[in-house]
Image: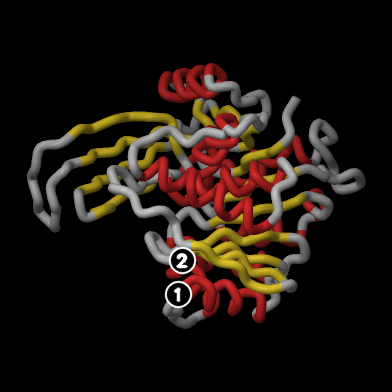
């Protein structure tokens, strides 16, 4: 039985990785992989590893790429029964290049998700998962790959009024789309230090100050990461922080999604703020070092 909904991008990640330091114009040997990805799907895949039963709400094309993607998701234990399948929209893809010095460049082709708009939310409104009169009351992970207009509508939608809503941008370039959630009652923001700066229209020296600034702007709660620097969890009762374990970084794409999922799973299991933060940082460290995060 589903106990968490993951709403947002479900697509194919095409990732090129090299052990070399790269710059613009680099042509180096490496490996290219195609794996299931997207913020919502990355979160869902990690939630499964921590014993949760997530369902996906997204758009996937009725094409070969879509059929194979759904088959792989179902094999991992994800509930795909609520996905919107489009006859005329292709399955989305994301392409990234990573070197020894981190992410070099990425292109997100998520046009189908954006074109599908609120069709992906039908199960939350037509009574299958909830409605405006009887809103879904469980845990929801929402990612910022949806359009700015749709995200703004969700922030005011009564169908989400009772949910434990956890929100994350897909990238710094989309962080501003989350402005309506900064002051939305009940929303928990998961951002990095740069994204927090975009939401607050300033720059921060560290994650604790960024997290506190989001609270000062009206956020109920903000969890701010900072790469290898200290991570912070801010709420009305104060700010806590912890530095992530030092590890050899072998991959970066999906690290933030892994952190968020592990944090959600920890709190769903009843862990307090400090324990949940520690568990999430440990899971993210395992992920970037090449290990598979697990409970």
Q: In what quadrant of the picture does the N terminus appear?
A: top right
Residue 21 x %, y % = 14, 52
Q: Is residue 2 left or right of residue 75?
A: right
- What residue would you read off at disc 2? 230
Q: Looking at the image, is 183 positioned above or below residue 146?
A: below
Q: Residue at x 38, y 29 (%)?
A: 35
- What residue would you read off at disc 1? 206
Label 2 environment density (alpha carbons within 10 Å; few <14, some 14–19, many ≥20): some
Q: Is residue 204 left or right of residue 18?
A: right
Label 1, secondary structure: give it: loop
Say whether marks 1 and 2 touch (CB < 8 Å). yes
Q: Foreground: 59 or 258? A: 258
Report the Cα–Cα distance between label 1 and label 2.
Answer: 7 Å
Q: Residue at x 53, y 78 (%)?
A: 209
Q: Residue at x 67, y 57 (%)?
A: 273
Q: Looking at the image, is 206 positioned above or below residue 259?
A: below
Q: In what quadrant of the picture does the C terminus appear?
A: top right
Q: Is residue 270 left or right of residue 63?
A: right
Q: Is residue 17 left or right of residue 6?
A: left
Label 2, secondary structure: give it: loop
Number of marks in picture:
2
Residue 134 x %, y % = 90, 44
Q: Residue at x 13, y 57 (%)?
A: 24
Residue 115 x %, y % = 53, 44
Residue 71 x %, y % = 51, 17
């Amino acid at each position: 039985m589903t106990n968490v909904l993951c709403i947002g991008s479900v697509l194919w990640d095409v990732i090129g990785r090299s052990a070399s330091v790269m710059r613009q114009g680099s042509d180096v040997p490496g490996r290219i992989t195609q794996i299931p990805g997207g913020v919502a799907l990355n979160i869902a895949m990690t939630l499964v590893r921590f014993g949760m039963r997530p369902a996906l709400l997204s758009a996937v094309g009725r094409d070969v790429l879509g059929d194979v993607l759904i088959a792989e998701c179902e094999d991992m234990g994800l509930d795909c029964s609520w996905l919107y399948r489009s006859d005329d929209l292709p399955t989305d893809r994301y392409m990234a290049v990573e070197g020894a010095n981190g992410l070099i460049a990425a292109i997100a082709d998520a046009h189908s998700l954006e074109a599908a708009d609120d069709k992906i939310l039908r199960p939350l409104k037509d009574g299958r998962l909830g409605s405006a009169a009887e809103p879904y009351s469980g845990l929801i992970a929402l990612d910022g790959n949806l359009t700015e207009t749709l995200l703004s509508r969700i922030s005011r939608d009564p169908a989400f009024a009772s949910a434990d809503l956890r929100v994350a941008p897909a990238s710094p370039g989309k962080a501003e789309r989350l402005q309506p959630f900064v002051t939305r009652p009940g929303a928990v923001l998961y951002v990095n230090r740069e994204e927090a700066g975009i939401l607050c229209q300033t720059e921060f020296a560290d994650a604790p100050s960024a997290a506190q600034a989001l609270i000062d702007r009206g956020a109920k709660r903000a969890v701010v990461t900072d790469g290898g620097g200290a991570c912070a969890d801010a709420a009305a009762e104060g700010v806590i922080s912890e530095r992530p374990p030092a590890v050899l970084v072998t991959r970066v794409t999906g690290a933030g999604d892994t952190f968020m999922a592990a944090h959600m799973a920890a709190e769903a299991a009843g862990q307090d703020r400090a324990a949940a933060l520690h568990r999430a940082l440990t899971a993210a460290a395992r992920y970037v070092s090449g290990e598979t995060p697990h409970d």
